[in-house]
Image: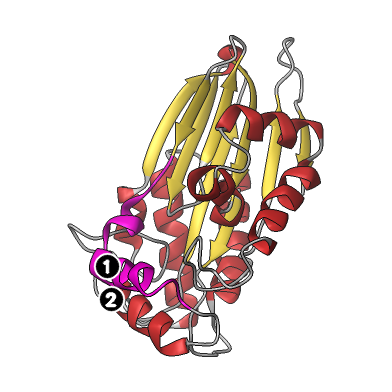
């Protein structure tokens, strides 16, 4: 699993990093001890964390959640938020599980920021206005869904199930890594990104990081911070259905 806590303009002890760590531990425990569908498992984890820490829907920090679970027959994928899962079949085809609903809200604010030439990383007001508009659409129909304090969000996660024997590798990543393909086109496509990730995960992280460094003021690619958090997990499946080799970066 990969969780990516949402950044927020205001400093708080319970921020995106906090909820990602706390919820991640709860999900990990349930993956070991609870069967059933991934959506229900995630809903139960969110409910438990919200109750334990008295989190209020709409006022709590949030995080993406992406999970890949497999056995000898199938690979189950869940994506809630913009941390995509990319699969490579043994025929060399790319399969993507993505949740782009966050990008569909606050479009006017994003357009105005782009017209002004980007955020300017010292301008917290622009970022705050964008975040406030996004939050107004969080975990509600017509908006976007994210892991926060509302268990119902888990049932809106994007799901996929693949045949295990059809896949060679799967990569799970935060949007700080996927932006390389999705926004910067560096690497130029998912095939190139998968090649880098499987050869040396750090090389993909460095590639995207260096691309952002070439746009230090966020003018070419408007964004709220110069460098986003970057993490990925690489899962390599063997043909004999033995335990796959896992690499985390």
Q: Earlier in the sequence, mark 2 or mark 1?
A: 1
Q: Vertically, is 88 above or below 46?
A: above
**Residue placed most toward the observer, 39 or 200:** 200
- Kindly indicate the quadrant of the structure image that contains residue 51: bottom left
Left or right relative to 144: residue 249: right
Proximity of marks 2 and 1: CB atoms separated by less than 8 Å? yes
The residue lying toward the viewer, choosing from 83 and 223, is 223
Q: What percent of the width, then of the height, locates residue 64?
A: 48, 58
Q: Is residue 14 above or below residue 159?
A: below
Asked which colour scheme the image uses, the reply is: secondary structure
Instruction: Report helix, strand or loop for mark 1.
Output: loop
The residue shown at (72%, 56%) is 210
| Residue drawn at the location 24% of the way across and 68% of the way down | 108
Q: Which of these two is toward me, 233 or 150?
A: 233
Image point (55%, 80%), residue name:
121
In the picture, measured across the screen, residue 10 lies left or right of residue 210, that is left
Q: Which residues are magenta?
A: 98-119
Q: Is 212 rendered above or below residue 191?
A: below
Q: Position of residue 179 (x, y in %)?
A: 54, 51
The residue that label 1 is drawn on is: 106
Crowd around label 1: few <14 · some 14–19 · many ≥20 (10 Å): some
- Work out whether residue 102 or residue 129 is closer to the camera in this orientation and state it: 129
Residue carrying label 2: 133
Q: Residue at x 43, y 54 (%)?
A: 81
Q: From the viewer's perspective, is residue 206 above or below residue 76?
A: below
Considering the numbered disc 2 on the image, is that residue within a helix, a strand or a loop?
helix
In percent of width and height, residue 157 lies at 36, 47
Left or right, 242 with reference to 25? right
Which label belongs to residue 215? Answer: none
């Amino acid at each position: 699993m990969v969780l990516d806590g949402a950044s927020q303009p205001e400093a708080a002890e319970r921020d995106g990093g906090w909820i990602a760590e706390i919820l991640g531990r709860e999900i990990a425990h349930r993956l070991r001890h609870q069967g059933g569908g991934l959506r229900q498992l995630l809903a139960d984890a969110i409910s438990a964390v919200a109750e334990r820490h008295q989190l209020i829907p709409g006022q709590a920090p949030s995080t993406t959640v992406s999970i890949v679970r497999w056995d000898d027959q199938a690979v189950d994928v869940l994506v809630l938020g913009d941390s995509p899962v990319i699969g490579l079949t043994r025929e060399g085809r790319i399969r993507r599980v993505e949740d782009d609903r966050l990008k569909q809200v606050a479009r006017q604010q994003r357009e105005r920021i782009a017209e002004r030439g980007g955020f300017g990383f010292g301008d917290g007001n622009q970022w705050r206005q964008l975040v406030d508009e996004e939050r107004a659409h969080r975990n509600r129909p017509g908006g976007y869904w994210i892991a926060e304090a509302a268990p119902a969000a888990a049932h809106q996660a994007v799901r996929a199930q693949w045949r295990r024997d059809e896949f060679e590798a799967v990569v799970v990543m935060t949007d700080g890594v996927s932006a390389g393909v999705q926004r910067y086109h560096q690497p130029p496509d998912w095939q190139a990104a998968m090649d880098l990730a499987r050869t040396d995960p750090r090389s993909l992280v460095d590639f995207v990081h260096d691309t952002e460094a070439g746009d230090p003021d966020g003018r070419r690619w408007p964004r709220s911070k110069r460098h986003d958090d970057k993490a990925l997990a690489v899962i390599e499946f063997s043909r004999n259905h033995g335990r796959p080799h896992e690499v985390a970066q």
